[in-house]
Image (cartoon, grey):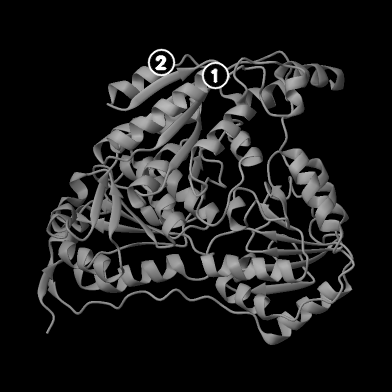
Amino acid sequence: MPSTRSGARLLVDQLLIQGVNQAFCVPGESYLAVLDALYEAREMIKLVVNRHESAATFMADAYAKLTGQPGVAFVTRGPGASNAAVGIHTSFQDSTPVVVFVGQVGNEFADREAFQEVDYRRMFGQMTKWVAQIDRADRVPEFVARAFQTATSGRPGPVVLALPEDMQLQTVTVPDALCHQPVNAAPSDMQVAALRRLLGRAQRPLLLLGGSGWTSAACDNIKRFAEANYLPVACAFRFQDLFDNRHPNYIGDVGIGINPKLAQRIRDADLVVAVGARLGEMTTSGYTLLAVPVPSQSLVHVHAGVEELGRVYQSQLMINAGMPQFASRLAMMVPIEEPPWRESVAQARADYEAWQQRPTVYAHAQPKLDLWEVVQILSRAVPEDAIIANGAGNFATWAHRFWRYPGLRTQLAPTSGAMGYGVPAAIAAKISAPERCVVCFTGDGDFQMTGQELGTAVQYGAGVLLLVFNNGMYGTIRMHQEREFPGRDHGTRLVNPDFAKLAQSYGAFGATAETTDEFAIALAQALAFMRERHLPALIELRTDPEVITPNATLTAIRATARLAH
């Protein structure tokens, strides 16, 4: 016989049924009853209190990417929901399963533009898979079950549920829902046979991996398929951890700052098998690697969301399937005998390894702090399964190009290009997997979007390592500004704090490195501090603003732009 419960208690009970054991929040008066119900469940659901709502939703996104389970966040109405929007948008573009609960004015005040009232159906309609408001407590189990089912099935993504204050206090007697069961399509025998025929006729195929919904088993199955067929494997923008970067079949990442030889290899391919990737602007270099709407290459596009297939690219073969379902079928496929491309994989791999060597930009600029060497020193100092998180900015290129991700769930990065993602993502990762080493690459502008979450890290004993690349400007924008309007930099310069002292003020370790040798010393000190104190450490890297990317200096970009103009 169902017990009589308040809407708030009913909601928390449903979270437990859905398997939720961690949630992120900024508290608000609009969901005080839910906070009280979470107090009753505090031994079962760990509530992490953030300093800003964007960090709460970023953390929920990172938690979902790291664990494979839906991330959960609670924010208050109006301003709180608005702050949370950046993380919700990130989850939408990254296809991450997240459920966000937003406090709402009571039903008796609805549609009067009451204090902080917003219609969330209209506000979040285009950046969620589903958004709804639970007006009646007796429908809480139904709505919550649907939210988790929707967030995790097909192409994963965010769901927003609004919680009117009076609904949270209503008492009802209703049964609980069941736990969600993620549903994904699987490829048919005919589709697998068609894929094999296309592969059998190819001379220059390429396997491109991306998207969400992957499991360790799915990645292992893809590896077996690639090995059996001697296929070169590339990973889409910020999905580099889907295939071991140390593997001889791995040939690089397809995103911003792509290796020109890899870009040409994709253009020259006669078959591209894109598994999981949306084939968006970043992965296709502005839709140039693959022509729209019909690529010159034969294209097999596999995606969990049926609505994505044919949306931009018309393919020879479109397969609606989840990644585990598709990868398991590929692993069982009879390999192509004596494939003609077999010997080309070694050359593609050699191109990748050459791309990872010390960059040519240092032939034109000799900074005291060598960022390529920083990455090499770091890679030798941390465990190989370290989680690397980053936000958005040119600084991230050093992690994307020169770090070798060994496998699934070692990279946390926003494909949406959201600034401020890295710091909260790293903290969420360390809270969720305290046994793992977590490193965050963040820029001076990027850090200051969510740097206050250092307080969260200290509060929960999250010993993350933060590397702040400080060049005194919004570097990516400055780079584009010099390219489009050379010599007219405006609105991109930053006056920054002493980041090391800022970290120390929170109780974290803080150090500054202006030379490569200083970084090596600071890194050793930071790692020792983290091991001993289980608290975060921050190293400010005072970088040469001239070295704007591994490939170019600002002076060179400006000079080239002036000639072009």
Report the amino acid beneath label 1: Asp
Q: How many marks?
A: 2
Q: Which residue is mark 1?
A: 517
Report the amino acid beneath label 2: Asp
Q: Which residue is mark 2?
A: 498
Separation of disc 1 and disc 2 at Cα? 20 Å
Across and down, in percent, residue 149 comes to: 40, 71
Q: Secondary structure at mark 2?
A: loop
Relative placement, left or right, of 46 versus 470 is left
Relative placement, left or right, of 491 versus 347 is left
- The quadrant of the rendering that contains the N terminus is bottom left
Across and down, in percent, residue 49 comes to: 26, 43
What residue is at 68 percent from the left and 41 percent from the top?
256
Mark 2 or mark 1, which is nearer the start of the sequence?
Answer: 2
Q: Is residue 362 visible?
A: yes
What residue is at 37 percent from the left and 22 percent from the top?
510
